[in-house]
Amino acid sequence: MDSLFPRASHRIVLVVSLLLIFSLLGCSKEAPPPAPPLPVKTTDVVQRDVPIYKEWVGQTIGALDIELRARVAGWLQGVHFTEGSEVKKGALLYTIDQSELKQAVAEAKGNLAQARTLMIRAKSDVNRYRPLAQAGAVSQRDLESAEAEYGARKGEVDAAQASLNVAEINLGYASVYAPINGLIGISLARVGDFVGRPPNPVILNTISSIDTIHVRFSISEAEYLDLASRLMPKGMRTAEERKERFQMILADGSVYSERGTVLFLQRQVDASTGTLQIEAAFANPKRLIRPGQFARVRAIYEDLKGVTVVPGKAVFEIQGQFAVYVTGDGNKIEFRRVKTGPMVGQLRVIEEGLRAGEKVVVEGVQRLRPDMVVAPSFIPLDSLLTAGQIGGGR
């Protein structure tokens, strides 16, 4: 029995030795190096003049949008243009079956010839009765009756001539010509269709003059009063001065290159909507804009001078207030609450909380915490705007 205890003690000594060796090896390892500073992108807080816009939703129309109508009923015989193409004034566009119309012209000519024959006979009677009445061979009453007959026959000739004119006009309507130079759309009727009488197509097509494109939009009564005071101050009422303030934004968000002029304002405010309709004109030399497009019209109604601005992406909202991260001494992050103004393009106006020359973080904001040390890389503000690397509107 006593011989077992030395073996147990040897085992205990061995286990303790191994534990001591492992602990010494663990203590000999060095502590891991600290994490590198978080890389972020920063830009300057700047002061500059910025325009403030107001925008309204509108729809484009041609400078002239003329509906082509079938003014006589008949079977459509020909379509003489390429749909969606430019057509010249006076070009033949449609022809309608002329058979019945030609028959109407022939009938009108026959009626006119008959009326003229009867008028000539009545005039001959008057010429014969007049000397006889003077000689007392016929009564004055017979002469007056002959003269009345001649007047009636003359009226019949005039009526027959008018009927012939109408028949010839209707025959002319069987050929539809382009009334203006413009862009023609897709035909609403095809060869073989009966046109000119509902429910079949009465409006065959539409031609639009798009050298100049118009945009119709509506503004509220309050906006109208505001714009009237801002855009047309005393001494600033010329069309050229107003022209520089109106722009068109297309459906893809791009700003149209041509500036616009307001052509007219509706006579009255729509009582049901409380809005006033406005129509503005924009040059369209490249035929880029087509009638029916969605568009927004905007106008500069105020110029802010020397205001503080930062990229819109640098500003974030927390607990109902706006804030930014500013890099300070030693590249340490500072949390800064700010009072914001309107968005102007990709920039946010800052009314309070920042000074020109400070640097704000524009990328990596979500991973930042106050007092963190970062590795900033500076990008000039205009470079960010040009590259489209920041958002926040137009």
Image (cartoon, rainbow, N blue to C red):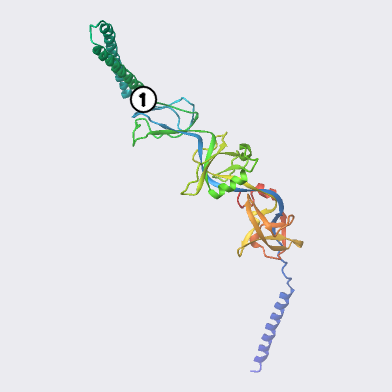
| Residue at the (24%, 12%) spot, across then down | 142
Viewer-nearest residue: 309 or 218: 218
Disc 1 marks which amino acid?
Asn
Where's residue 122, x and y in %? 27, 12
Helix, strand or loop for disc 1:
helix
Q: Position of residue 145 (x, y in %)?
A: 25, 15
How many labels sit on residues?
1
| Above-or-below relation of 137 to 72 | above
- Quadrant for the N terminus in the image: bottom right
Q: Pick whichever, 163 or 78, lies toward us.
A: 163
User: With respect to residue 58, does 108 lie above or below?
Assistant: above
Give the residue furthest to the top.
135
Q: Position of residue 24 (x, y in %)?
A: 73, 77
Residue at horizontal 48%, vertical 26%?
A: 89
Between 364 and 127, which is closer to the camera in this rendering?
127
Q: Is residue 268 left or right of residue 230?
A: left
Q: Is residue 109 visible?
A: no
Which residue is labeled 1 in the image?
170
Q: Is residue 64 visible?
A: yes
Q: Quadrant of residue 333?
A: bottom right
